[in-house]
Amino acid sequence: MQQFILKSILTALTGLTMSLGLATTAQANTVALKFDIPAQSTVRATTDSSKPVALKFSPDSPSKPASQVSMPDADPIGSLFTGGTDSLVSKAVGSAEGTRTPTGGYTSAYYGHVDPGNGVWNLGSFSYQHGAVSPEDADQKQLRRLQRQTLELRRQAQAKSINLSLLEELNGIDLANQAPLAALDRGYINWLFVAKQQPMDNQSPIVWARTKAFLDPDTGYWDAPGLGNHWDTIYRDQQRRYDAILRALDSH
């Protein structure tokens, strides 16, 4: 009888132990399944964290102040002087001087003539009178000079916030060839600026500005003895030159 009771007690204890062991195992499995992080999440976190750092904090190129950004050199005179004696400038100014035809041909005056204003011997497309051995030599010398004067005209126009049209610029260059002081010494660009601020009835603002440019800015008197020092005679000459430039431009 005692043996039977002891055997029953041992059996009950064994069942209880197994029951507790299964519960412990199940609980451990539950804990493992609940808190275990899949390997896939780790890979995603590593991959994603590398890219945003590079994109956000490492720009491709650091920004610079505008004054330090290097810009490509621009052609200072465009195509106006391309071709030398066959350039648009040579044909336009030469046509105004009477040494070239609107299509670029040569007149007898190209090979030499006396300046009607001061009696000096002129050579080449631009009626050059500062010493040259041939018309071709005269053209090369004056082309270099006109390039520098063109840059000065552009500088003055920029200071006045004027965007010169091709016709306006060619007339400025021609005036610089005819009378450098009228073109460059507070003359053509200043008067062109004034002309653009007011209506011009039946006259070209360019011709008006060219004519007014012969006023001495210091005295207010005309400084064009070769043109009669009178509005009418100066205006007619500037209109004639303007028309010649326009024909050359149309033919170029």
Image (tube, grey):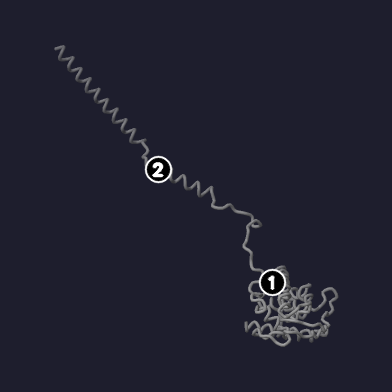
Q: Residue furthest bottom?
A: 108
The location of residue 203, given as percent across then percent down, is: 71, 84
Q: Secondary structure at mark 1?
A: loop
Which residue does the image show at 82% across and 76% down from the upper left? 216
Which residue does the image show at 83% across and 79% down from the upper left? 223
Q: Secondary structure at mark 2?
A: helix
Image quadrant containing the C terminus: bottom right
Residue 201 seen in render: no
Counting residues from the start of the chain, the first of labels 1 and 2 encountered is 2
Q: How many marks?
A: 2
From the viewer's side, name the closer residue of 228 and 47. Answer: 228
The location of residue 176, given as percent across then percent down, is: 75, 76
Which residue does the image show at 52% across and 49% down from the upper left? 56
Image quadrant containing the N terminus: top left
Residue 184 seen in render: yes
Examine the image and state in which quarter residue 237 appears.
bottom right
The location of residue 184, given as percent across then percent down, is: 76, 73
From the viewer's side, name the closer residue of 175 and 86. Answer: 86
Left or right of residue 15: residue 218: right
Examine the image and state in which quarter residue 174 appears.
bottom right
Q: Is residue 53 above or below residue 34?
A: below
Per the rendering, the mark at residue 162 is 1
Q: Residue furthest top?
A: 2
Left or right of residue 19: residue 45: right
Residue at mark 1 to residue at mark 2: CA–CA distance: 63 Å
Q: Amino acid at mark 2?
A: Val
From the viewer's side, name the closer residue of 54 and 226. Answer: 226
Q: Amino acid at mark 1?
A: Ile
Q: Is residue 12 above or below residue 184?
A: above
Report which residue position mark 2 lands on. 43
Neighbours of disc 2 within 10 Å: few (<14), some (14-19), many (20+)? few
Q: Residue furthest right?
A: 219
